[in-house]
Amino acid sequence: MKFNTNTTTTAVQNYEGAKVFVMNPAMELYTAIVTWSLGDSFYEKNNKRMARVQELVAQNDPLFVAKLAVYARHKMYMRSAPLVLVTELAKLHPGGDIVARVTDRIIARADEITELLACYEILNGRTGPKKLNRLSKQIQKGLGAAFNRFDEYQFAKYNRPGAIKLRDALFLVHPKAKDDARQALFDKIANNTLQTPYTWETELSALGQVEYVNDEERAIAFRNKWEELIDSGKLGYMALLRNLRNVVEAGVSYAHIKKIGAILAAPEQVAKAKQFPFRYLAAYRELLQMDQPAADGVVGKVTRFFTSSKGYTGELLDVLEQAVQCSAANIAGFDHDTKVLLACDVSGSMTGTISAKSKIRLYDIGLILAMLLKSRCGYVEVGIFGDTWKTITVPRSNILGSVQQLYNRANEVGYATNAYLVLADLLANHVVMDKVMIFTDCQVWNSNATGESLPSLWDRYKRTVAPNAKLYIFDLAGHGYAPLTLLQRDVHLLAGWSDKIFDVLAALDKGADALAEINSLEL
């Protein structure tokens, strides 16, 4: 099935009243899913996005929906959105085994078993003591397969309090054990006798219950515990990334700082960890804010009694830069003969955080994706736009530092979404670019009411300056509209927050459509 044919035909208005084009159901579902953290956005409440996704699932081929769920989980690193797709798919297609197969594929962590059941409960409006007594047989089959994949440590690690506990899930799914050892493990889940896992959460929680002679003794105990956790090799990549500031403030030794650096910057560890690029940015900013008191956490409250490792912060900033460069290593990029312009939307609607608990803003996503690509290009110019458009020179290799530099200058261009100024500048100065890339929420308009627009200026630019140029819209919000008609006039749209978005870019440059990566997946 070729989804990207006539992807935008009907003209409507976006949230700012500007003319935009409706995507076809496959493109709209793709953009909605890979940019969704199941939270409110600037223009769209979560319940409205949920309703739109439910309608789109019904309008799409079930095989495409299933493949999109797998793509979102394993390529775009989404956790919640794939569960929504599977739940909705089970409502519409109870027969066959497609739901069972995709359920098994998207359960990558033991806690996603209970998460899927909770999602199923909510989206099917189940309430009362027997709210999950009519589980989809296909989801039950897929979860049964998932139950046979995780070991005791993985089950125990995610055996957390919640509306649906792991034990509840076991009784509901009734998985058939693949062997006697597996049955013994299922019995442990049923009897709540799983061995307490050795994790940083359980270890620090236990340490927090101890009574200490004084706060200095307490601080030393936490320093020693962090060093023990680092030495154990059981402190996962994401845990290290998220706790860098806590580790530094705990005052761990330089030898342990080196161990952390060796893990975080190792190319094979970066590839295995599959982190969103913005995770590195979040850790980078936490270290930059070391002069400010920690917002929470036991360690941050006791550092005045013990010397921190703050003097090593610069080395860890370098480590994070190395790590994010590793994540960019497989991006195809473009050579010195290909002229690339990267334009980042820093308007007001891009300032919202991507979730209620995150400090990362939507325009941070655009900035870091742009800098990842810049690091792989020979000839590239970078700029930011809001009310105005401004080009800013930043180093090619310093990805996180460049993001921070652009972030600090975002207020210089104002808060409208005048993307048309990017092209107006190219036209005014007769600048030839081979590829113009705009990272945005696609709510572009003309706040100056001059009559110029992105579509009209792109037409003029193609006719008078750069007939072979291509325009790429990186949709970071997934509202379902494109500011230009796609495919015609060399205009392409792609979406997502992961560095894997550049696989789609590479496919587009080879003549494939934007959904080729999804359609190529096997279930």
Image (cartoon, rainbow, N blue to C red):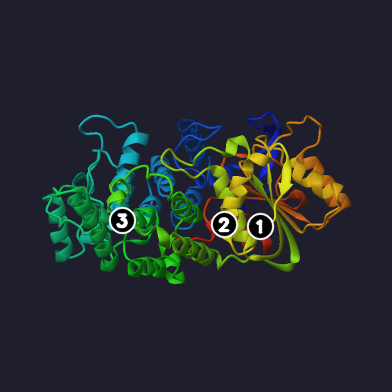
Residue 401: give its label. Answer: 2
Circle 1 SS class? loop
Disc 1 to disc 2: CB gap under 8 Å: yes
| Label 2 Cα neighbours within 10 Å, binned few <14 / some 14-19 / many ≥20 | many
Residue situated in front as seen by the camera: 459 or 387: 387
As drawn, 271 above or below 465: below
How far across and how far down the image is residue 25, in percent? 58, 42
How far across and how far down the image is residue 330, in percent? 56, 68
Q: Nearer the viewer, mark 1 or mark 3?
A: 3
How far across and how far down the image is residue 236, in percent? 33, 61
Q: Is residue 206 visible?
A: yes
Q: Is residue 397 left or right of residue 184?
A: right
Q: Nearer the viewer, mark 2 or mark 3?
A: 3
- For the C terminus, the image quarter is bottom left
Residue at image location 47% in from the left, 56% down from the top: 280
**Which amino acid, mark 3?**
Ala
The residue that mark 3 highlights is 250
**Which amino acid, mark 1?**
Val
Can you tell which quarter of the image residue 294 is in?
Answer: top left
The residue that mark 1 highlights is 394
As drawn, 116 above or below 446: below
Q: CA distance from mark 1 to mark 3?
A: 34 Å
**Which amino acid, mark 2?**
Gly
As drawn, 209 above or below 387: below
Can you tell which quarter of the image residue 237 is in?
Answer: bottom left
